[in-house]
Image: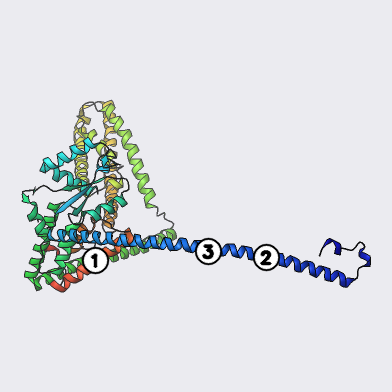
Amino acid sequence: MTDKDIPDEWDTISEDQIKNNLLTLEISNKLRELKLLEEEYEKLEEKEKEIEKKNESDLKIKEFIKNEIKKGGEEIDKDEEIEREQQQNEEEEPLLLVNFTKWSYNKIRYIGGGKIENQDLFDRLLNKLNSEEPFFITMTDDLLERELAFHTTNKQWKDDIKHLEQQYKGDYFSLLSYPPMLGGFLLESIWSKIKERTEWKSVNILKCIYLAKTNRSLLYKHNMALAIEFMALEQKLLGPTAKRLKDEEDLEYKIKLRQYEEMMQKRYENEINEGIIKNLQQVIYTNEGISNNLDRINNSKINEINDDYNNDYNNNEDNDDDDDGSYCSTCDGRNSGSDYDNNDYDENNDNNNNNNNNDEDRMIEEIEGDDTTTSTSFQQSDDDEADNELDEEDNRKKKKEKLIEERKIKEIEAERIHKENEKKKFETPPPPVLNILDKIIAMIFSKLTIQSNKEFHYQMLKRLESSIKETWIEEFGCLPPNCLWREEQ
């Protein structure tokens, strides 16, 4: 629609003409859009052609690279096979991986480029370890216990050092070889004894595999390997006798457990009976109008005795100038003993009570002896002296009565404490008897390097423990009795 087609006056145009004009306008707009789309499509086709050309060139490059990698990989595989064959032909040798960063308190570190920080310190430590065998044994034992050194072999050290460097990021590990002699034995003989196979599968799994790679010293492994072999050999020679010994150990534990249960049952019955008796006594006392607060009575008596005795003791110091002090010293010991703490009571307290009773007997005899001496002095003294002697005699009688009463209270208190201590003995049941094979497995497995997460590691060890014990029972008939273990081995 051109400009000449536009009318001068829209009022003279009909509706049909207006519709036709609008349709022609829309058609022209659509044609323009189609032309634009065609142009864009042509451009996209050209770009796709260019991309296809580039992809073809890239594919050629990739194929070339793959071919080169295959050639290099084949060469690498050949080199690895050669190394594996060499390692298989080589005899296995034990080594140590030492964390020098942790050992030197972060002074020795790897700084890149094949260099380490504090190289002088590193060289001195290596020279010290390699020069003196006693120092090597002592120091490596300490490092293994502190988890600063780890067992490895000449066939396994590459994988082990990668795992340790991932686990201890930033720390510097170095390989350390053992001296040719350890504790008077050749290194080869020690390692060969640890790896030596036996006729029993369970012993081989425990000794040759897991004991060999646990993070403990070679001398410890050597002694443990000998002890395991001797124990297995002795159980094999005993035959059915080993089963009877194991049953006796189990029976002994069952007897102890049954005795504990019976004692606990008896204790509960006594407590129930005592409670019933106390309740009945309380009912009777309340009906009769009598107070049953025995603890209050005993405590008040003890306090009264202590207060009165302290006053008498002070008066005696003023009046009796001729006394040698033995009486006061024993009284002082007696007075301090009345306020003892229940927590300090032990098995020797019975002997102390007996000694205290003997002291009190001597004190009573001295008081009675003083009574006889004072009776003679009454006849020789005048009236004033007689009055003083009578007062002293009354005081001695009071002291004698107090000593007797205090002894009774002490006996009651000692009996109560003795009962409490007897109860404490049976608070916990006898611990279960751990089999010697469980102890050996625990000593070995506790020092294995954790290769994965802890949960999976411990689950694996649990399965291995049950498998070793089942295999041992199949081969020997039962688990080893504890009496077969020799501590000196």
Of 135 and 374, nearer the camera is: 135
Three-letter code, disc 3 = Glu
Of 452 and 468, nearer the camera is: 452
Residue where numbered disc 2 is placed: 35
Q: Position of residue 357 (x, y in %)?
A: 21, 45
Image-based side of 297 in relation to 76, left or right: right
Residue 48 shows which numbered tag? 3
Q: Position of residue 348 (x, y in %)?
A: 20, 47
Distance from the alpha carbon under mark 1 to that under mark 2: 78 Å
Q: Position of residue 259 (x, y in %)?
A: 23, 66
Residue where numbered disc 1 is placed: 464
Give residue 235's quadrant in the image.
Answer: bottom left
Distance from the alpha carbon under mark 3 to that under mark 2: 20 Å
Distance from the alpha carbon under mark 3 to that under mark 1: 62 Å
Q: Residue at x 42, y 61 (%)?
A: 57
Is residue 250 visible from the viewing direction of this image?
yes
Q: Residue at x 9, y 71 (%)?
A: 241
Label 2 CA crowd tier, 10 Å (few <14, some 14–19, many 20+) = few
Which one is earlier in the sequence, the residue at label 3 or at label 1?
3
Which one is earlier in the sequence, the residue at label 3 or at label 2?
2
The nearer-to-camera label among 3 and 1 is 3
355 relative to 318, above or below:
below
Three-letter code, disc 1 = Leu
Which image quarter holds the N terminus? bottom right
Q: Position of residue 22 (x, y in %)?
A: 81, 68
* Callout 3 touching callout 1 (CB < 8 Å): no
